[in-house]
Image (cartoon, rainbow, N blue to C red):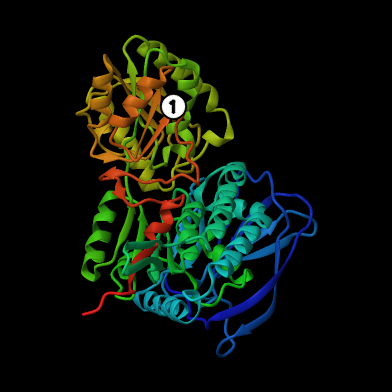
C-alpha cells in the first residue's frame, strides 16, 4: 500500500491533559477512515489529549503524517491522534517510498493501522542521525546528565501508563490490566535502574610494576541497532534501549511489523523528555527493514530478540561489518517436578510458565518432566487448574496473528498423531480472532516434534522421569538453553540440578519470575550476550587500556 508523501513534522515539547476514568470506545483508521475497530477489555483508561506547542513544520504545508485516532467514550467524546510515523531526529515522517504496512487486531482480525514501511533510504537517514548525535552530543555528555534523561523518560512512562497500556493491549491482544500492572511497571523500573547506572560505569586502575601505571576505560560503541519482537513490544524495547543509552550509545530501534504502535509513542515520549535529536530513532518496518538495518555499515552494535532463523541472518549481516551482537533467540525450556515438591505450587507455577501471554514467551517452560511417583496426580491437578484459570481474562488472549494461530494448531495435531495423550484441550468459544485454547499433552517422547521444536503457544508437553540424572539429561536434550525450572523441597538437590542444567536462567520453585536487576540470556542456540542487570552495560561498551610509563627509559 502507498500513501502520499508528507513532509516531516518535528516538535520540541507538548502538553498532556487528563480527565476522569473511562474506557476506549472505538479506534478509527487514518487516512482511509474506512473502518472502525472495537477495542475489547478496555476497563481502565484516562483522557489523554495531545496538544502540541512550539511545533515546527519542515517544508511546505501538507497533510499530517499517518496517525491513528483513538476515540474515548467520555461526554463529549475526545480523540487522541496517535503517531505512527518514522521517528528520526525527533521528527515524525512517513516512509520515503510512501509504502506502508497494515497491522491487524488479534482479537477481531480487523485493520488497526497503516504504518510506514521504512526503506533502506529511511534506515540510512536514521543511522546518520544517530551517528551525528553520538559524535557531537551524546558520547561526551556526562553519565549523570544521560541518567537524567532516562529518569525523565521513566517518569513519562509512568504518567502515561494508562494510555500506553490501552495502545499496547490493542496492538497485541493482551488484557489491558495485564499490561498496566505487569509490563508498564517493568518498563518504568528498567528505565530508572539504568538511569542510576549511567554515571557508575567505571574502568580499573592497574600497576603491574613500579615503573608502569595502567587504567582501563569502558567506552560506548556508537550507533546500536535494536530489533525487537512482537510478544512484549514496549518492554523489550526498554530492555535494550535503556542500557544502550546509559552507556553513551545512540540507537535506531526497529519495531515488529505486527506491533508498532507503542514504539512510535515511545518516540513521542523521547521528544517530551527532551532527548537531543538523533539520540533515539524508531523505525517501523518488516524483515527488509531489519536486513537493511543489520547490514548498514554505520551500525556499531546489534541487539536482536526473535527467532533462531532470523538470528542466523542477523549474525551473517553483522559478520560482514565485524559488528558485535547480542542475540536472544528461541527456547524450549524444561520444568522438572520432583516427588517431594509442593504439588499445588508446582502446578500453579508450571501453568503460569506456559499459559501466560498465551504461551508467547521465549522462556516458557513448555516441557514439563514429572517424577513417575506423582506423574498422574500432577497431570490431573494441572488440567483442573488450567480449566479453572481459563475463566480469568489474563488467560483469554489471542495469538498475535492468523499465521501463528494455524502453526500452533498444526503442532497440536502433530503431537496427537505422533502418539501424545491429550489431557486437556480448551474450547475458546470465539469465532473471531486468533485464539488457541490451552492444551496439555502427556507421554511426549523426546523425539516428538512438539518436544523438539518451539511452539510459542499455550501448549504444555509432559512426560515422567525415574531419576534425577534422567531428568537433567532430558532437560538438556534440547538444542536450546534459555531457561529451566526446578521444583523440589530438597535445596541440595535443587542446587545440584541447577549446576548441571545447560540454561542461562534457572528458577528454583518458581517459573518465569525474572527480575530486571538479574542478567538474562541463553546457552546454546538460544543465543549469547546478556540483557538486564549490570551485565547488560558490558554488551554496550568496549574496554580501552591506557598505559602510562613512569620510569622505564630506553
Q: Residue at x 35, y 67 (%)?
A: 214
Residue 537 position within the rendered picture, expressed as x and y whole percent measured from the top left:
43, 58
Quarter in which the C terminus is drawn:
bottom left
Relative to 395, say whether 313 is above or below.
below
Residue 297 visible in the current orientation: yes
How many numbered marks are there?
1
Q: Dot 1: what SS?
A: helix
Q: Quadrant of residue 135?
A: bottom left
Query: Which residue in the structure is indicated by mark 1?
Result: 350
Relative depth, front residue between 314 and 261: 314
Residue 386 position within the rendered picture, expressed as x and y whole percent measured from the top left:
48, 24
Residue 488 position within the rendered picture, expressed as x and y whole percent measured from the top left:
41, 19
Q: Would residue 316 appear left or right of 460 to someone viewing this image?
A: left
Relative to 224, say whether 436 is above or below.
above
Q: Residue at x 41, y 17 (%)?
A: 490
Residue 88 visible in the current orientation: no
Relative depth, front residue between 97 and 159: 159
Toward the top, the furthest residue is 373
Relative depth, front residue between 227 and 299: 299
Relative to 144, say whether 403 is above or below.
above
Relative depth, front residue between 58 and 250: 250
Residue 245 position within the rendered picture, expressed as x and y whole percent measured from the top left:
48, 65
Quarter in which the N terminus is drawn:
bottom left
Toward the bottom, the furthest residue is 60
- Few, some or many C-alpha atoms within 10 Å of disc 1 (few <14, some 14-19, many ≥20)? many
Q: Quadrant of residue 465?
A: top left
Relative to 494, say whether 547 is above or below.
below
Amino acid at each position: 500500500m502507498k500513501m502520499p508523501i508528507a513532509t516531516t513534522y518535528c516538535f520540541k515539547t507538548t502538553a498532556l491533559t487528563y480527565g476522569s476514568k473511562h474506557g476506549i470506545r472505538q479506534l478509527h483508521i487514518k487516512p482511509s477512515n474506512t473502518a472502525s475497530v472495537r477495542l475489547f477489555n478496555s476497563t481502565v483508561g484516562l483522557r489523554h489529549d495531545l496538544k502540541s506547542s512550539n511545533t515546527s513544520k519542515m517544508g511546505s504545508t501538507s497533510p499530517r503524517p499517518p496517525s491513528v485516532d483513538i476515540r474515548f467514550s467520555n461526554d463529549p467524546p475526545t480523540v487522541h491522534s496517535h503517531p505512527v510515523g518514522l521517528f528520526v531526529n525527533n521528527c515524525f515522517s512517513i516512509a520515503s517510498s510512501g509504502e506502508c504496512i497494515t497491522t491487524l487486531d488479534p482479537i477481531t482480525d480487523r485493520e488497526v493501522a497503516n504504518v510506514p514501511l521504512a526503506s533502506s533510504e529511511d534506515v540510512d537517514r536514521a543511522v546518520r542521525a544517530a551517528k551525528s548525535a553520538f559524535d557531537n552530543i551524546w558520547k561526551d555528555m556526562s553519565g549523570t546528565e544521560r541518567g537524567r534523561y532516562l529518569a525523565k523518560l521513566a517518569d513519562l512512562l509512568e504518567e502515561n501508563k494508562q494510555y500506553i497500556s490501552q495502545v499496547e493491549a490493542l496492538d497485541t491482544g493482551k488484557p489491558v490490566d495485564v499490561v498496566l500492572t505487569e509490563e508498564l511497571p517493568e518498563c518504568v523500573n528498567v528505565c530508572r535502574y539504568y538511569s542510576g547506572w549511567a554515571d557508575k560505569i567505571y574502568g580499573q586502575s592497574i600497576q603491574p610494576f613500579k615503573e608502569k601505571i595502567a587504567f582501563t576505560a569502558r567506552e560506548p560503541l556508537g550507533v546500536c541497532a535494536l530489533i525487537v519482537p512482537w510478544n512484549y513490544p514496549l518492554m523489550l524495547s526498554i530492555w535494550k534501549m535503556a542500557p544502550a543509552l546509559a552507556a553513551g550509545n545512540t540507537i535506531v530501534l526497529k519495531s515488529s511489523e505486527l506491533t508498532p504502535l507503542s514504539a512510535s509513542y515511545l518516540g513521542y515520549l523521547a521528544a517530551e523528555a527532551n532527548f537531543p535529536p538523533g539520540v533515539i530513532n524508531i523505525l517501523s518496518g518488516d524483515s527488509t527493514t531489519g536486513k537493511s538495518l543489520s547490514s548498514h555499515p554505520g551500525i556499531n552494535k546489534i541487539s536482536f530478540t526473535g527467532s533462531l532463523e532470523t538470528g542466523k541472518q542477523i549474525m551473517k549481516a553483522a559478520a560482514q561489518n565485524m559488528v558485535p551482537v547480542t542475540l536472544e533467540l528461541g527456547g524450549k525450556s524444561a520444568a522438572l517436578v520432583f516427588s517431594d515438591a509442593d504439588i499445588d505450587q508446582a502446578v500453579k507455577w508450571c501453568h503460569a510458565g506456559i499459559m501466560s501471554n498465551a504461551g508467547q514467551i521465549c522462556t516458557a517452560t513448555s516441557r514439563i518432566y514429572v517424577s513417575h511417583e506423582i506423574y498422574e496426580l500432577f497431570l490431573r491437578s494441572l488440567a483442573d487448574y488450567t480449566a479453572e484459570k481459563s475463566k480469568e481474562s489474563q488467560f483469554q488472549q489471542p495469538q498475535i496473528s492468523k499465521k501463528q494461530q494455524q502453526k500452533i494448531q498444526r503442532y497440536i495435531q502433530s503431537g496427537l498423531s505422533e502418539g501424545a495423550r491429550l489431557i486437556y484441550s480448551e474450547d475458546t468459544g470465539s469465532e473471531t480472532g486468533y485464539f488457541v485454547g490451552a492444551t496439555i499433552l502427556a507421554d511426549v517422547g523426546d523425539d516428538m516434534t512438539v518436544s523438539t521444536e518451539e511452539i510459542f503457544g499455550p501448549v504444555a508437553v509432559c512426560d515422567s522421569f525415574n531419576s534425577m540424572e534422567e531428568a537433567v539429561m532430558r532437560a538438556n536434550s534440547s538444542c536450546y538453553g534459555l531457561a529451566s525450572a526446578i521444583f523440589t523441597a530438597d535445596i541440595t538437590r535443587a542446587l545440584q540440578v541447577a549446576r548441571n542444567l545447560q540454561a542461562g536462567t534457572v528458577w528454583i520453585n518458581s517459573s518465569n519470575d525474572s527480575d530486571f536487576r538479574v542478567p538474562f540470556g541463553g546457552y546454546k542456540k538460544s543465543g549469547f550476550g546478556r540483557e538486564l542487570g549490570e551485565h547488560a552495560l558490558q554488551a554496550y561498551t568496549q574496554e580501552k587500556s591506557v598505559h602510562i610509563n613512569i620510569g622505564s627509559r630506553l
